[in-house]
Amino acid sequence: MAQQKKKDNNGDAVSIRKQLVQACKRVVIKAGTRLLVDASALARLVEQIKTIRDSGVQVILVSSGAVGTGMTSLGLKKRPKHLSEVQALAAIGQIHLMALYDAECRKHGFQASQILLTAEDLRSRGRHLNALNCIESLLAMDILPIINENDPVSVAELKFGDNDMLAAQVASMTRSDLAIILTTVDGLKKPLPDGTLGDRISVVHGVSDEIRGMARGTDDASFSIGGMASKLKCADILNSAGECLWIADGRDASIIRQIFNGDDVGTVFLPDHGKIESKKRWLSTFAKAIGTIHIDDGAAKALLTKGSSLLPSGIRKVAGTFQRGSIVEVCNGKQIIAKGLSNFSAAECRKLAGCQTSSIHDILKCDAESEVIHRNNMVVFHGNVK
């Protein structure tokens, strides 16, 4: 059950926030399309970024707005429906958007850089590491990385879904202490029986089914996509990696300063464990599974409570076709409880299902590992994976 702190009893919530920002050395800030509809809004954003950069915090900006800027440039009021037209608008708008960022950053004495990513760039381990190394180099040079999805070349299966998800994945990849999603609502609110929204929830410990049920769509489809449900998925991703998400109202001209003052604004989503290592982080968030291994209750308990490797004796069923070294999901019933690198192919796993480790050599007629998935090559999900 998620614990919630409300504004009328916010002592602990404020303390949590202050501790969080005081410990923050690296932050990812995501600014949505509707917050970047004019140059003055962008200027205020950059001014606040300068303030926290000056305090010693490394900043990575994930910026929407390319399509919206392209629409404004062409005098369009309605977002096109055809993908190719949206991609064309992104190509037009991105150059204008970056020109604005470049000018504003130079006014404040620092430089900006542009990185355009597709989801496949982060799923592929090699390209993932290349992107990470580039961002790390930019930060080392004290340059602001500005990241957006590479819309002109992205197709449906290679898209992040929205820039909320891009921000969460960038924050996870860069092991940032905090991700801030600036939106047009002031945080998560609990729906009341009459259909209205109640008080803002200040702090959430774990994204439970109850919390997911509070999601409401918040965005105007004219320029942008996404909503509160998307932001809760981001909280899931970051919390599972041991990191924090802060959702706040970006229409407030001083919202970033308030956040770094530890003020009680927006909603903070806190993890229940520390940061996980980079390899397991990639497995958890980015790697795409191509098969499924179904296991029994005993094996599930060993994985969840003892940190064990997956042994063949716990396998009950294997779904899909995969080879040795492939990434697979591990399921107990309908719940995904782990993901990892399989030491055996799907055909071999089917042969080994239910057998003892000592029988592996006799069954496969070759030398092989004693674990189906070694615990060092596996990430375990202790909560529900949606």
Image (spheres, rainbow, N blue to C red):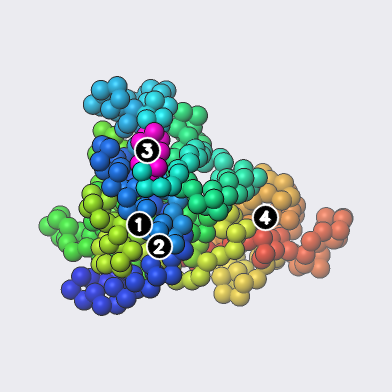
Q: Are marks 2 and 1 in contact (CB under 8 Å)?
A: yes
- Say which mark, if any, is on residue 51: 1
Question: Does any portion of residue 43 appear in the rendered image?
Answer: yes
At label 3, the amino acid type is: Ala
Coordinates of residue 214 in the picture (x, y in percent) = 27, 57
Instruction: Looking at the picture, tell me which residue is in the foreground, 42 or 127.
Output: 42
At label 1, the amino acid type is: Thr
Tell us which disc is closer to us: 3 or 4. Answer: 3
As measured in the structure, the alpha-carbon distance from the residue carrying label 2 to the one carrying label 1 is 7 Å
* Residue position marked by numbered label 4 in the rendering: 341
Q: Are marks 4 and 1 in contact (CB under 8 Å)?
A: no
Secondary element at image label 3: helix
Earlier-in-chain disc, 4 versus 1:
1
Secondary element at image label 1: helix
**Residue 247 placement: quadrant:** bottom left
Earlier-in-chain disc, 2 versus 4:
2
As measured in the structure, the alpha-carbon distance from the residue carrying label 3 to the one carrying label 4 is 46 Å
Considering only vertical position in the picture, is 143 above or below 54? above
Instruction: Name the image quarter holding the C terminus.
Output: bottom left
Instruction: Name the image quarter holding the N terminus.
Output: bottom left
Q: Residue at x 15, y 55 (%)?
A: 195
Earlier-in-chain disc, 1 versus 3:
1
**Residue 77 placement: quadrant:** top left
Q: Residue at x 53, y 55 (%)?
A: 174
* Residue position marked by numbered label 2 in the rendering: 55
Considering only vertical position in the picture, is 68 above or below 266? above
